[in-house]
Amino acid sequence: MKENLEQDFIKLLDEHQNIIHKICRIYTDNLEEHNDLFQEISIQLWQAYKTFKGNSKFSTWAYRVGLNTAISLYRRSSKKVKTTSIDIGNYQFKYTEYSDEDELRLKKLYEAIRKLNDIDKAFIFLYLEDKDNNEISEALGISEGNARVRLSRIKVKLLNIINS
Amino acid sequence: MSELELLKNHWKNHDNFPKKQVKELQLIIKKKSLNILNWLIIINFIVIGILLLSSLLAEDTGIIIINSKVTSFLKVLDYVLFLLPLISTIVCIYIIRKIKTDNSVATLLKNIIDLKKTVRLLVISYFLVYLIILLIGLYASSFTIDNLIQTENITESKAYIVFAITCIIVGGIYYGILWGIYKLTYRRFLKRLYENYKSLKEITEN
């Protein structure tokens, strides 16, 4: 029984592992931290899966557990590796098909996201993942109106960071 | 293309992460969790352990029996010292069971903060009980000092000064260690969590 549960879970985890990678991409600065957070989210998903009732899609549920782990439970490694924006760019993003100008704009955008706090990062992450205000409000536990107002403020904040 | 459209476009088209193999995933979920809840529980037990140990050691110091009422009161306090960690552990287990990672971020953060508050309440209760025991102890020790002055031929003022300095040093070291463990570890573990909680609260209040 337990083995079946584990097999089912591993199959789902394998199919949806990109969700975890993307959360790690927005919350970590280097590969070591990325792998640490990936591990922690996977463990939390597995522990919560034992009581997962399937009321929502696995992916929706995984977004929630993943963000919760990144925001509330995960502690960054104390031996933090010093990185520069170039390191971050190299390990996470590729810009091959973009013009030099767009590459620079994108690098500035990702740098600006790094400067946001954990909660604002969650908003931007859910926005980039095409989640609507209702889904954002449910994931974060705030009202839909608050989610809408906050998201538009964060977008402005992001653009201000880039232009400053 | 606007900045945000460019970002969204790039985000969607660049998700070719190095895929983890099934065997790797199986190993990952069997690893130990690094999460702060585990650390909160460990710190809780360290604090309780130190307090219990020191209360056991304090029993051997042999406070002079002043009168039967004070002695019975001290006995009650002793029981309280042993009951507090038990109650705290039960409450902590209850709160930890409530902490579910598939709740909303706001609920999860609130539950973790509640857990921390419970531990803080235990530590404050312990300090209060200790303070009462210490005060009774100091009062009882004044009888010891009187005996010392008579038997060892030490001046009264000298005996009291030595006694007061010893109390301050020993008490200071003891409370200092506990303060260090409690404050520094919690600050270290929960700083980021508090910031996130504050940030989320600001959103709902605005």
Image: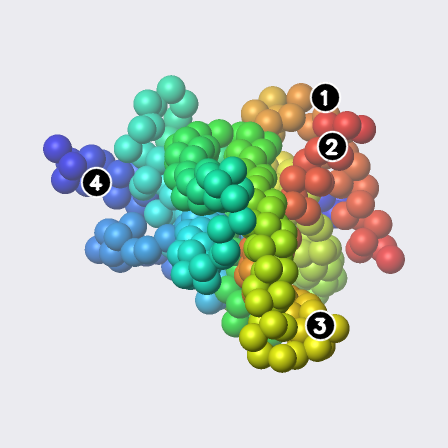
Three-letter amino acid code at the position of disc 1: Gly
Q: Position of residue B189 (x, y in %)?
A: 56, 55
State which chain disc 1 sits on: A
Label 2 and label 1: CA atoms lie apart by: 10 Å
**Labels 2 and 3 positioned on one and the same chain:** yes
Q: Which residue is mark 2?
A: B203
Three-letter amino acid code at the position of disc 2: Ile
In this picture, is A56 found above or below A62?
above
* Picture quadrant where residue A154 is located: top right
Q: Which residue is mark 4?
A: A6
State which chain disc 2 sits on: B
> Which label's residue is closer to the chain start, 1 or 4?
4
Label 2 and label 3: CA atoms lie apart by: 64 Å
Disc on res. A145:
1
Q: Nearer the viewer, mark 2 or mark 1?
A: 2
> How many neighbours does mark 1 have within 10 angstroms: few (below 14), some (14-19), or many (20 or more)?
few
Label 4 and label 3: CA atoms lie apart by: 74 Å
- Whether residue A42 appears in this view of the structure is yes
Q: Position of residue B137 (x, y in %)?
A: 57, 55
Name the element at disc 3: helix
**Labels 4 and 3 positioned on one and the same chain:** no
Three-letter amino acid code at the position of disc 3: Glu
- Whether residue A86 appears in this view of the structure is no
Q: Which residue is mark 3?
A: B156
Label 1 and label 4: CA atoms lie apart by: 39 Å
